[in-house]
Image (spheres, rainbow, N blue to C red):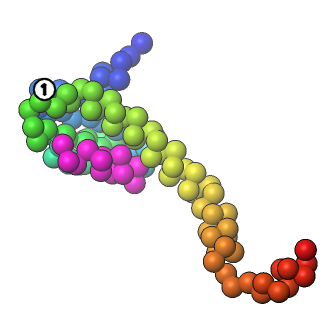
Amino acid sequence: MREISDYFVDLSKKKANIVVDTTIYSLVAIRAAAYPFLSNYHILVTPSDDRHSVVIIFEAKLPERDINTDLKEYCNSLLDHQVRVQLDASNGKIRDLIVAHAFSPIDLQNEINSL
């Protein structure tokens, strides 16, 4: 069985690359998952040699960062953000209708009379 760290490329103490399949994860999710790590890493998302993946380059700003653990956290965050993207795609219209109804003007007297 493969380990999560098997997907990390060029892992060193301060830098690492991770290859992410864009047929599984959207670029929106990939970028959103990277955002919380910007305070500790310089991050670059770049196309890989094939057309179905991107390489995400993490370079630690401080040498005491545990890049292996942080990349595993990135993987968890990536899955979380991909699920959010998919939920938004499937439930976005319902959410928009609920919000529109919640903020639409109502005739309070008619609402009271209907009770």
- Compare residues 96 and 89 and report the one nearer the observer: 96
Residue extending farthest right: 114
Judge by depth and name the residue closer to the eye, 113 or 7.
Answer: 113
The N terminus: image quadrant = top left
Where residue 115 sits, quadrant-wise, is: bottom right
Q: Residue at x 40, y 44 (%)?
A: 22
Q: Is residue 2 above or below residue 22?
A: above
Question: Where is mark 1, residue-wise?
Answer: 12
Q: State the SS at label 1.
A: loop
Magenta portion: prevailing SS class:
helix
Does residue 79 lie above or below 69 as drawn? Answer: below
> Looking at the image, which residue is at 14% across and 39% down?
59
29 drawn magenta = yes
Question: Where is residue 41 shown, x and y percent of the image?
Answer: 17, 43
- Residue 29: x, y in percent? 41, 49
In the displayed structure image, the side of residue 26 where residue 104 appears, left or right: right
Q: Residue at x 30, y 50 (%)?
A: 35
State which region is magenta: 28-40
Residue 37 appears in the rendering: yes
Q: Is residue 21 magenta?
A: no
Q: Nearer the viewer, residue 78 or 103?
A: 103
Which residue is found at the position 40% from the left and 34% from the top? 76
